[in-house]
Image: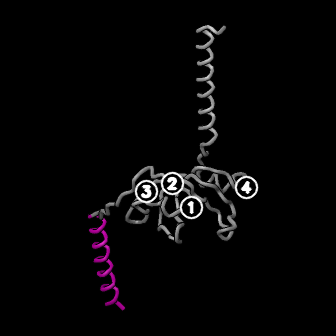
Amino acid sequence: MIDGRQIHYFRLKVVLILIFIFTLHSFCSTAASFTSRDLIENSKLLDGKLLTYRGEVIAAIMGRGDYSWVNVYDGYNAIGVWCKTSLLKDIHFLGDYKCRGDVVEVEGVFSRACSAHGGELDIHGIKITVIERGFRKEERIDKRRIGLAVALFALTLLMVSVFRKRL
């Protein structure tokens, strides 16, 4: 005969087992995060592994039909990411002299010498998430520097005209 206490303990065990399974699954399925330095220095060890890489999208999105290349710069190096073009739809700013690019987190498979892409080191992106929006940089010109440049130019012209007369 099963009493209420045994049923309560059985339910508690089932709940604890489910919590353990979900925690273990989320821990195991989460890709470890790496920097470009980690990828370059440990390329043999990480080859073919699912991982996460974070950085600023720079330069251009280079479309190749249903897939595209994008370069992601983490402050040390830029790593090429090959992914479905649809994964890049949320990217609005590309880093260059005038803009700070969107910061993204790329989850994908790392290749130290990708046979599909001429032996290049790359990441085949599975999921790309925009972490931080980029923005246009305001270009400010320091008026003191303009004044200094004009003064130096005038001084140079004066020196040229003085020494020219002597020769």
User: Which three-letter amino acid code belongs to the residue tagged 1?
Assistant: Val
Helix, strand or loop at label 1? It is strand
Q: Which residue is mark 2?
A: 128
| Picture coordinates of residue 146, whole percent (x, y) | 28, 68
Q: In terms of secondary structure, what is the magenta stretch mainly?
A: helix
Residue in the image at 70% along x and 67% along y: 115
Q: Quadrant of the C terminus?
A: bottom left
Element under disc 3: loop
Image mark for residue 44: 4
Residue 44 horizontal side relative to residue 136, left or right: right
Residue, disc 3: 102
Do labels 1 and 2 touch, CB within 8 Å? yes
Looking at the rendering, the stretch of residues picked out in magenta corresponds to: 143-167
Q: Are marks 3 and 1 in contact (CB under 8 Å)?
A: no
**Residue occupying the point 31% across, 77% down:** 153
- Check contact, mark 4 vs mark 2: CB within 8 A: no
